[in-house]
Image: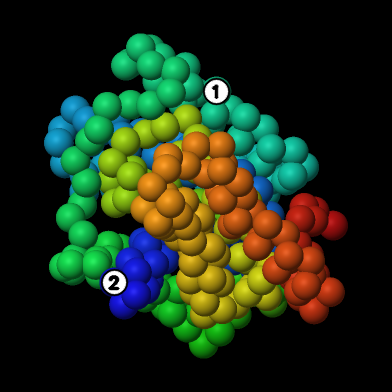
Amino acid sequence: MIADLLNILSNTLVSMVPLTLAAVGEIITEKSGVVNIGLEGIFILSAFTSTVVTFHTGNPYLGLIIGLLVGALSGVLHGIISVYLKGDQIIAGVGFNSLAYGISILSLVSIWHSHGSSPSVDKIPMIGKGSFFVSPLTPIAIIIGIVVWWWLERTPSGLKLRACGEDPRAAEAMGVNVYRVRFYATVLGASLTGLGGAYLVVGWIGQFTKFISAGRGFIALANVAFSNWNPLMAIIGGFIFGFFDALAIYLPIKIQQMSGRVITAESNLFRTIPYLATLIIVALIMKKVRMPRALGKPYIKE
């Protein structure tokens, strides 16, 4: 029993990393007034590019850095469209999700002649022994969440960013360049999501599959609402959603061991656990959340 609990805890700590990084990054973006629902696309594209780099260099740390850079470039694209071109932020995010998925699948076929997955690549070693293990990026993700909370709530630059999301006209009147703040916040938020996407490959799974994100970008968005745009609560939310993800992996394996038969179709039923939990949690807390007042509204100077 203790071994099982340690195993679930370990998988929870491993699963929470991309959810926490993406949620904290999206909190930065949305606190500035920009919404980016293209997290799923960033996960996919950064995971794919990190796989390609790691496959050819054998260096998972380099793959992690490249994934972060791809996330940053994705943020640049979304920032230009949403902030400077004043495009519809929702449509831009949906379009990027479709674009990233299409690019990754076509590239997967072109490079490895596979429609499903890439070859295995080197991973960043886990820390621990026996039934308990954890990724080195788990404490890093937690520290990032704490630092972002301190920055947003306790520093003048964090106050300026929050002002851009609450009342951009008042922020502009106080000398804040709203366009610049929103753009940089979008790039920084997407960079953290890109780091989470690269982690899916080089820190966890060890190969790219076309379903590697598995809706985690949307679960991260749910985590933003769950946390009420608080990075500290996003860490807790990442742990909770990561627990349901770990439970969906653990249960079919445990049932198979106890029953002695192969779990096939039933395993897909267990995989719905994280998404059902997300729907229930969001439905319970949505009436209590308070989003930034200028969220999703392009700022137009008079």
Residue pictured at 15% horizontal, 36% vertical: 58
Identity of the amino acid at label 2? Ala
Relative to 262, residue 175 above or below: below
Helix or strand or loop: what does disc 1 sit on?
A: helix
- The one nearer the camera, 75 or 247, is 247
- Location of residue 250 (image quadrant): bottom left
Rendered location of residue 97, percent (x, y): 61, 36
Mark 1–mark 2 distance (CA, rounded to whole Å): 41 Å
Other-residue count near label 2 (Cα within 10 Å), few / some / many at <14 / 14–19 / ≥20? few
Relative to 153, residue 91 above or below: above
Rendered location of residue 54, percent (x, y): 22, 36
Q: Quadrant of the N terminus?
A: bottom left
Residue pictured at 63% horizontal, 66% vertical: 224
Relative to 272, residue 59 above or below: above
Q: Do the residues labelled 1 and 2 touch (CB within 8 Å)?
A: no
Q: Is residue 136 left or right of residue 72?
A: left
Rendered location of residue 168, percent (x, y): 75, 67
Q: In which quarter of the image is the C terminus?
A: bottom right
The residue indicated by pointer 2 is 3
The residue indicated by pointer 1 is 102
Q: In this view, does 194 lie to the left or right of 41?
A: left
Identity of the amino acid at label 1? Gly
